[in-house]
Image: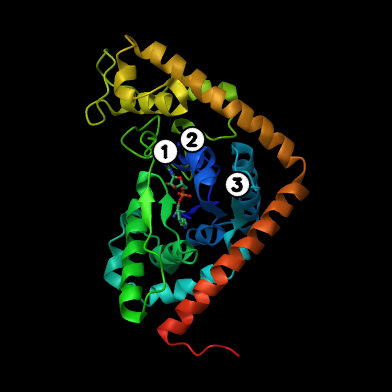
Amino acid sequence: MTTIFSGIKPTGHLTLGNYLGAVSRWVGIDQHRADALFSVVDLHALTVEHDPARVRRLSRQTATLLLAAGLDPDVCTLFVQSHVDEHARLSFLMECVATDGELRRMIQYREKSARAAKSGESVRFSLLSYPALMAADILAYRTDEVPVGEDQRQHVELARDLAVRFNHRYGQTFTVPRAVAPQVGARVMDLQDPTGKMGKSHADGSGVIYLLDDLAAVRKKIMRAVTDSGRDVVYDRAERPGVANLLDILAACGGGGDPAALAASYDSYGALKRDTAEAVIEVLRPLQERHAKLAADPGEVEGVLRAGAGRARSVARPVVDAAYAAIGLLPAV
Ligand code: TYM
């Protein structure tokens, strides 16, 4: 059976980008067609400046939102990364297989460290080593497929390279994983700056739709989205990124089919924005209702996470033990 693993880090409130690029696919397809494991990867949230109480709060909220979005604990495994020691155990081995140059080439590291350097700040060492931990997350489950948005593809490629290298040097241990992304929605852009990704840690949230945003605010953000100087509605990601982003969002939120074909049915930006806003609201409304119910019963979410961690541990433990033995560490007796 195919094994699927993916994760989401609790560094901010979940966005429409997270939902369309990853979560909606986990819910709609992935959990039903494979042995699927999904994780709130809280250790990754420590790679940037963080407030301990906020990380705790966001971890709980992220798990609750994933269940509200439709992850079904009867068919998939949902857990918190730090509850399963195997991730940290395997991460060090991955650091011993990866090279310094390889990690420094990661786009997210280059962008974030360059931004910090400009304002005279330093970044945590773990921001550099983070893709080794991500590789461990994936390889510990002998994962075949990793459903992610476009921005994570390079990290999954690295996990592939590390799996191949480890197997070659120390004997067949890991499955070589591959990234899979949705047809539309793999890169949702910021509504105020459609040349940049919609991200959960943006300081100014006016271009970002959060899954728990008030629905009137969602409508306002979409109606105020930056479009382009032209007037006709055409799908052109390079020349008309604002309009293309709205068409992508509309298509991915059930507006039907392919964004280029959708463009033909609009002759004004106003109508496109109105329909996009309605489509997004129809996705968020039931999700928010389920979230409110689940949040009122934290014991239920905790129970799901406890069972999920137990299941995840039982899968990862023998794989990580095998990697420890293969690389030359003396087994504990
Ligand atoms: P994270 O937490 O930034 O994002 C979670 C998922 O959401 C996708 N995503 C987007 N998709 C489309 N448009 C956007 N604007 C957008 N923003 C985010 C991401 O591609 C991702 O799929 N390093 C990972 C977390 C991680 C992980 C893993 C993922 C840790 N270990 C192992 C897969 C497997 C991250 O920072 O995702």
Q: Is label 2's Cβ within 8 Å of ligand 1?
A: yes
* Residue that carries the numbered disc 1 in the rendered image: 198
Q: Which residue sits at x=63%, y=28%?
A: 286
How far across and down, in percent of the image, does residue 48 sit?
A: 48, 58
How far across and down, in percent of the image, does residue 19 sit?
A: 49, 38
Give the Cα distance between marks 1 and 3.
Answer: 17 Å
Image colouring:
rainbow
Q: Nearer the viewer, residue 11 or 117?
A: 11
Give the Cα distance between marks 2 and 3.
Answer: 13 Å
* Mark 1 or 2, nearer chain start: 2
Q: Are marks 2 and 3 in contact (CB under 8 Å)?
A: no
Q: Against 96, is 291 above or below?
A: above
Residue 124 visible in rendering: no
* Residue that carries the numbered disc 2 in the rendered image: 16
Residue type indicated by callout 3: Thr
* Mark 2 or 3, nearer chain start: 2
Q: Is label 1's Cβ within 8 Å of ligand 1?
A: yes
Q: Are marks 1 and 2 in contact (CB under 8 Å)?
A: yes
Does dot 2 land on a helix, a strand or a loop? helix
Counting other residues with Cα less than 10 Å from the Cα at mark 2, is it few (<14), some (14-19), or many (20 or more)?
A: many
* Residue that carries the numbered disc 3 in the rendered image: 62
* Mark 1 or 3, nearer chain start: 3
Counting other residues with Cα less than 10 Å from the Cα at mark 1, is it few (<14), some (14-19), or many (20 or more)?
A: many
Residue 175 visible in rendering: yes
Left or right? Give the position of 275 relative to 235: right
Q: Which residue sits at x=50%, y=50%?
A: 34
How far across and down, in percent of the image, does residue 107 sit?
A: 31, 55
Q: Against 216, is 87 above or below?
A: below
Counting other residues with Cα less than 10 Å from the Cα at mark 3, is it few (<14), some (14-19), or many (20 or more)?
A: many
Give the Cα distance between marks 1 and 2.
Answer: 8 Å
